[in-house]
Image (spheres, helix red, strand yellow):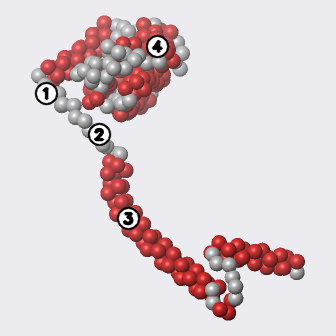
Amino acid sequence: MRRVLSYSLNNQLGFMVVAIGVGTELAINGAVAHAFAHIIYKGLLFMSMGAVLYRVGTVKASELGGLYKMMPLTCIFCIIGAMSISAFPLFSGFAAKSLIMSSLGYEGLVYAYLVLLAASAGVLHHSGIKIPYFAFFGHDGGHKVKEAPTGMIVAMGIAGLLCILIGVLPSLFYSILPYQIDYNPYDAGHVLAQLQLLIFSILAFAFLMTFKIYPPELKSTVLNSDWFYRRMLPALGWPILSAVLSVWGSFLRKVRGIVNSAWDMIDQIMHSPLAGPTVSGRAVLIQAGLLSSILMIAYVVAG
């Protein structure tokens, strides 16, 4: 689930980049508004998944489900974040995205408008529907857990309240933007167009789930760029590492053999008839060697 939210960052940043490319006062306001609102509702979604991870121990979609019974407040806050990122009217995402979409319309950038419209449908599916559905609804995962701790609930509550306030009172939100503009996001045409997009996207998801066309949940890890360090590097690295360790082990065995031969030679000399009575043991020899070294250093220093 957290990976899905991370992917949707690319989607949301795309809106901001397009708005900066348009460059009008309305578009720049849209980029700033979207960045501000996005931090809040994406933070709320990450916090809700963090609460699930804290209680359940996993956020894999295939291992969750049915948590709305045990974690109702977390479920509500997650839905608020999902509705915000999907740009439902009366939520922060709608107040921010409408600035960008309107700026494209005013400049006659039809193709860019259609691309962002498709991106809006995509983020609704991936973050707006998939996150709350598979985490809190869907099949029952059988988890018996408690609600999130109080600190987490308070943090999610503050973020959720901001998401609603920005959507309900967009004029206050617009007053802190770089340019002063006279803009009302709640005109009939824009609200109806957004609702049509949202409703048909939800119906498409419901159709796929009802007729079991939607891809089944699999207990697996979806790899993308991390394939390089999860698959390729171990496949290439382990043979190389094994070869290096083999050579190093052979080298250490040879060194150990040389050292043991040297000790054996010293032992033979120390126990020979010419050496006279000696105290056996390598520890004694090491101590004698250290004392001899200290004496030699002292003689050298003394001149």
**Which residue is at a point 27% across and 12% down the rendered structure image?**
195
Q: Are marks 4 and 2 in contact (CB under 8 Å)?
A: no
Is residue 277 depicted above or below 154 in this figure?
A: below
Is residue 37 or residue 262 the one in the foreground?
262
In the displayed image of the protein, which residue is found farthest to the front? Answer: 277
Specify which label sits upstream in the sequence, 3 or 4: 4
**Which residue is at a point 46% across and 13% down the rendered structure image?**
157
| Quadrant housing the C terminus | bottom right
On the image, the x and y values in percent for residue 220 come to 26, 38
Secondary structure under the numbered disc 4 in the rendered image: helix
Kind of residue indicated by mark 3: Ser
**Which residue is at a point 40% across and 24% down the rendered structure image?**
55
Residue 256 visible at all = yes
Specify which label sits upstream in the sequence, 1 or 4: 4
Q: Which residue is mark 3?
A: 242
Is residue 37 depicted above or below 283 in this figure?
A: above
Neighbor class of circle 3 (other Cα within 10 Å; few <14, some 14-19, many 20+) is few
Secondary structure under the numbered disc 2 in the rendered image: loop
Q: Quadrant of residue 72?
A: top left
Instruction: Return the mark for residue 157.
Output: 4
Specify which label sits upstream in the sequence, 2 or 1: 1
Kind of residue indicated by mark 1: Ile
C-alpha span from label 1 to label 3 = 46 Å
C-alpha span from label 2 to label 3 = 27 Å
Specify which label sits upstream in the sequence, 2 or 3: 2
Neighbor class of circle 4 (other Cα within 10 Å; few <14, some 14-19, many 20+) is some
Residue 166 visible at all = no
Kind of residue indicated by mark 4: Gly
Q: Which residue is mark 1?
A: 213
Is residue 265 depicted above or below 195 in this figure?
A: below
C-alpha span from label 1 to label 4 = 36 Å
